[in-house]
Image (tube, helix red, strand yellow):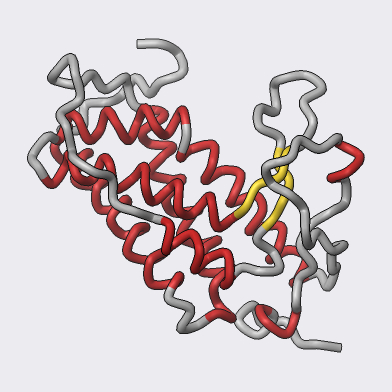
Amino acid sequence: MSDATLHAVGQDPGDFAVQIADSVESFIVAVTEVAKGEDPDSAVPFLLLEVSQLLLAGGRLGAHEDVLPDERYEPDLGPEVDVDDLRERYAVLLDPVDVYSEVFDPYEPRKAPVAHRLSDDMADIVSDLRHGLAHYRAGRVTEALWWWQFSYFTNWGPTASAALRALQSVVAHVRLDQPLEDLHGLDTDEDLAEDDLVEQAGRVMADEIAGPLGVKGR
């Protein structure tokens, strides 16, 4: 086992899997409910909480020894569940803070920030988690753990980490009464220079989310 993993991994794999699956399912249910838009004022702080909790499960997967699947090839799960509706709902719900900038790899030198969308992030994370949950519900526990661990390193982990940073930034700017410059119209499919993204973010509408955060307008 490498130094990058926990050495005390004596926990029963079945118990570990149940705990991870519970965290995964809780996140999927929660973000699906938020996307309905029934309480838009609480969307950002609620997502901040849910993504933070999910990343705790991700950290446990990342610190665990490598999970090896039982079969050489991944069993076919059939068509993936469509997440476009979830993506579109969040694009509306999170406007005008949907677009943010992020560095893909902080250890890659001179890497310019790129544009991301929180709506894309939520949909992509849910898609990855559902894939593993399908294996888990089919009784393929090891396959589920392998998928969740592998995709934590390759996709949903970095995505959730970037989204958490953006959500925390929105909450912090509201709480500190520091509105950001308008980022409306930024093309997330376009590679932009660092100067084009510095100090840009979606303008926070304090009257939309300040209430749930306990911030009074001046």
Residue 106 to residue 131: above or below = above
- Say whether residue 159 is left or right of residue 34: right
What is the x, y in percent for residue 112? 79, 31
Q: Residue at x 12, y 34 (%)?
A: 140
Q: Quadrant of the C terminus?
A: bottom right
- Residue appearing at x 87%, y 45% in the figure: 198
In the rendered image, residue 6, in percent from the top left (x then y), is placed at 38, 23
Q: Residue at x 80, y 87 (%)?
A: 217
In this view of the protein, which residue sits in the foreground, 211 or 200? 200
> What is the x, y in percent for residue 11?
20, 32
**What number of labels is visible?**
0
Q: Is 211 displayed left or right of 155 in the figure?
A: right
Observer-nearest residue: 50 or 76? 76
Q: Where residue 172 sits: x, y (%)?
A: 73, 63
Q: Residue furthest right?
A: 195
Locate the N terminus by quadrant.
top left
Q: Residue furthest top?
A: 1
Query: Is 109 situated above or below 103?
Result: above
Quadrant of residue 44 within the rendered picture:
bottom right
152 left or right of 106? left
Residue at image position (63%, 58%) is 167
